Image (tube, coloured by chain):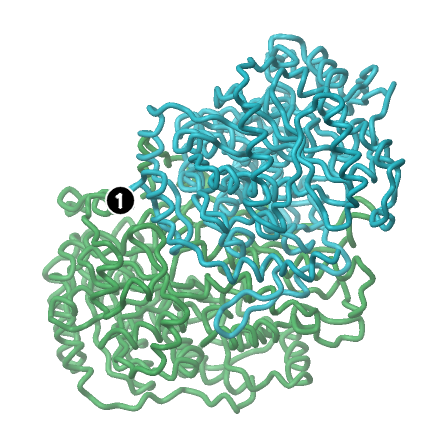
Chain colours: A green, B cyan
Amino acid sequence: MTIKTKVPSDIDIAQQAKMKPIVHIAEQLGLSEEDVELYGKYKAKLSYDTLLQLQKQKDGKVILVTAINPTPAGEGKSTVTVGLGDALTRLGRKTVIAMREPSLGPVMGVKGGATGGGYAQVLPMEDINLHFTGDIHAITAANNALAALIDNHIHQGNLLNIDPRRVLWKRTLDMNDRALRNVVIGLGGPVQGVPREDGFDISVASEIMAVLCLAKDLEDLKTRLSAIVFGYTYDRKPVTVKDLGVAGALTLLLKDAFKPNLVQTLEHTPALVHGGPFANIAHGCNSVMATKAAAKLGDIVVTEAGFGADLGAEKFFHIKSPVTELNPSAVVIVATIRALKMHGGLAKDQLKKTDLRALKEGITNLEKHIDTMRQFNVPFVVAINRFATDSNEEIEWLESWCSSQGIPFALTEVWEKGGAGGEQLAEVILAEMEQTKEVTPLYDVTQSVEEKIEQIAKKVYGASSVEFSLKAQKSLEVVNKNGWGQYPICMAKTQYSLSDDPKQLGRPHSFTLHIRDIVPRIGAGFLIALTGDVMTMPGLPKEPAAYNMDVASDGKALGLF
Amino acid sequence: MTIKTKVPSDIDIAQQAKMKPIVHIAEQLGLSEEDVELYGKYKAKLSYDTLLQLQKQKDGKVILVTAINPTPAGEGKSTVTVGLGDALTRLGRKTVIAMREPSLGPVMGVKGGATGGGYAQVLPMEDINLHFTGDIHAITAANNALAALIDNHIHQGNLLNIDPRRVLWKRTLDMNDRALRNVVIGLGGPVQGVPREDGFDISVASEIMAVLCLAKDLEDLKTRLSAIVFGYTYDRKPVTVKDLGVAGALTLLLKDAFKPNLVQTLEHTPALVHGGPFANIAHGCNSVMATKAAAKLGDIVVTEAGFGADLGAEKFFHIKSPVTELNPSAVVIVATIRALKMHGGLAKDQLKKTDLRALKEGITNLEKHIDTMRQFNVPFVVAINRFATDSNEEIEWLESWCSSQGIPFALTEVWEKGGAGGEQLAEVILAEMEQTKEVTPLYDVTQSVEEKIEQIAKKVYGASSVEFSLKAQKSLEVVNKNGWGQYPICMAKTQYSLSDDPKQLGRPHSFTLHIRDIVPRIGAGFLIALTGDVMTMPGLPKEPAAYNMDVASDGKALGLF
């Protein structure tokens, strides 16, 4: 990409940026020094008192940024989220961005952070990508405290009659560590605990991350933690955190992590970066606390959901919105020429040359997500996130495709130009938000689990049928026997395809969605429907990003991105 | 103890205390807001720039607080450290306390924190006892990043020829979790890594904790991390972090954790609470960075070392002082009537009644530690840390025992009275510090490993001989073959006895010290001599402290201590 010679690396841009003291950013939002708890000069948590007081204020409007199905070409959803926030600020709108915070594991593994890119970044990017304010470490600690307390209970007489073969709760580390996926613990004889098969997940896959991101206040946090089902007794009764009597201790470990983190963009737009649950086995968006606080503090909130609209946006509407009681006023669907061409069958190394045939083929993926947003009855705009390799011919074709079908669209160049590159998008979306539409969920939580899954499969994915494995059918019996059928569904599906086969790009038709298992997440308040294999503990690549990292003698981070 | 009805619980005292903003405490030390990085209003890290600038200033004097061998009766070493700091402040001396930061694992397990007690505490105690500024979480992350990078290297072709059966590096969690002591990892088939036996330690037992606490600056930190030997090749050559190429990444993960944390006592004496390595398999005192910074900022530093003087003080002189180039100007040996009576043979439930016979029997333990301090040629004071159950008769006997032998002593009542209760001790120690003595190490690092161990065993423990197991002899060969013989010794011995048998209280005579193994810690820069079993991953008790913890709806911690 020739543009790379003009735009410096993310870390160079970030380290050369002149941040405002975070208390000044707080002041922009009408907050005083008393309302924030500083973590250095450029990070702060909103105090819990302030969060409680904010509840009385009225809500701003929410813009949800989602995307087509991701491809290795990259779509730049976080970059567009940041750039759109900056653009709205430039247009004089009081805007607050709400985003997920990144996990350390991938940072050590694969080059590339989660704080936007180019001239559309949140800062301080090194801190946010490393330990930030310790939220994920606190989640790890709470997760592993529960694990230790469970195994200790079993070891110390097992009054609750927990079946060690049916403990569902895994330990977690915020690290990509494949060797911990399958382990045997408790070896070494009677004083070293009770041996059993176990495994570790990455911390962001912990149910505690999902719980923290869905709780409305500390009481709700404790209630959800109490409800976590971590295993079954020998007579197959569910055992909860409440039964073990440690919901208070877990809440205590999480009480600071629960408060949203305030940072800023390169252009000083306030951003609440908080929580980061997986977008497959969890719902994949930042915390309810952050989105709610952003809506109280800003007239407009720009927020994002993980992966494509089939996973992130669907869960935003069905899982998160009912908790926040805030539906998006409009949705941005990010698409790139490169990614659409991959959906049209091109390989990653063939993307540089103009290929209208592949683009026309791949547009079907975008088309399906547009169809889904129309079903949700939500205003939307297609953001064409421009890359240097895109030809004018391709851009023009995509624009005319949108125009001819009455689809609102805008070109964005936020990576290269920051907020200025997002003004067109900001204007189009502000216009779309004027419509007063009522968002329509695609299923009703009172429906049966099978019906809810079928609604998502058919309406959002375009599947023709759903098949439940024997295991899934057995799990369904357990779910129904325990009265858990009334929860919304959290689909765990490959992000690369609308189907459950990651190789089926574009818009697959007449396919069957295979439900492998149903996993209750009673604390989080959803039922995971597993399709295919879902990786909950990533591995490191052959050449981990860690090999390039260093610190200068003055303490400056080197080689981070 | 009747005194409990007068003195409220630690957490009640702590939560009712009126702290000064930490920037005011910094100002007391001549530091501006620019010199500190705030973590909330009452915690801060010293900026790395400031730490570098401080290096030019001259050092204050160091008082080391140590104790007789600990007993279940409790000695109150941290409480005396805090109270003495406050007392010196009351006497107009510019005093800075340097202490270890507590591990979360024990906090969840056993009621009782590590921030002093009664009216001699460092604040904010809840924060310090929970996640504090995230230092230990960063150490956990760095430790486990290295572990994941090692197993990933083996999985991805093993260019370094690492023998999976000879990986020494364990993963860590900051949790008491006995079920992780012995595990098998890498199960589940070829794509899940290489199966091998492994185990987890508690984070504070990580070599990275020892490294962080002994490094003088970021360069030294990286050098020490580089030198860590994490395993051996199939042809028995040591493999280091440098060989793996990840010292930079580990340093990056630790760059903030490396900066000392500034907090305050109940009486607003500045305290640097930073680092907390084990006192058996590591050297057991707070970071070199904190002690050095405290010496630059204060005229007097009050600091402590873990366990009794046989472990903590010995290692302070032989391992830490050579790095800081700061020998203590005086040592406080904390003793209690209760603990001395236990050394004299009384059980814990018999301590309330006056028992001069047991006291006279148990005084031998104190006597040996006094002897050791005399060998080190360091001025010292015996601090009799008064408990409500101590009778006047017992106190008088102990005082007259000290007087008759010309041993400087003072009564302290800091738990009940704060700094005021430590003024007598402060005055006695200030007088003792006037002596100009030159501390004499008890061995020379150029001696052989066996000789160094023998010096410690005979001079500090009073052993008559040392026996090396076959395993230890083999390990010694490896140590010598690799040229590691020049490092100081870090004894891993039970804290309860001067011998390696925890049941031998008082002052055992004519005993043999058994060396089970020698473990190189090349990053930390010492050789661990293991005697008996050393627990590096504690377990939770039957009724963990976690069962009592909670959070009020306004976010206040409940039931922490």
Q: Residues within 10 Å of mark 1 (few under 14, many from 20)?
A: many
Q: Nearer the viewer, residue A156 or A561?
A: A156
Q: In this view of the protein, can residue A514 be seen by the observer?
A: no
Figure check: B560 above or below A293: above
Please count the marks in the image: 1
Residue at position x 77%, y 58% from top? B542
Q: Relative to A491, say whether A535 is above or below.
A: above
Q: Residue furthest top?
A: B447
Q: Considering only vertical position in the picture, is A387 above or below A483?
A: above
User: Is residue B146 shown above or below A363?
Assistant: above
Q: Amino acid at mark 1?
A: Ile
Can you tell which quarter of the image residue B219 is in?
top left
Q: Quadrant of residue A258?
A: bottom left
x and y percentages locating residue B284 in the rendered image: 61, 33
Q: Quadrant of the C terminus of chain A?
A: top left
Residue at (61, 76) in percent of width and height: A227
Considering depth in this image, is A180 or B208 the residue closer to the camera? B208
Which residue position is annotated with label 1? A11
Residue A555 percent location from the top left of the image: 33, 35
Residue at image point 32% right, 67% down: A98
Query: Along the horizontal axis of the image, is B464 left or right of B336?
Result: right
Q: Does B554 sit left or right of A506 as displayed? A: right
Q: Chain of mark 1?
A: A
Q: Is residue B383 left or right of residue A437?
A: right
At x 41%, y 24%, the residue is B59
Q: Disc 1 on helix, strand or loop?
A: helix
Rendering coords of residue B180 (x, y %): 69, 48
Residue A99 in view of the camera? yes
**Residue A82 in the image: x percent, y percent?**
24, 62
Which one is nearer the viewer's eye here, B527 or A22? A22
Direction from residue A424 to residue A543 in the image, left or right: right
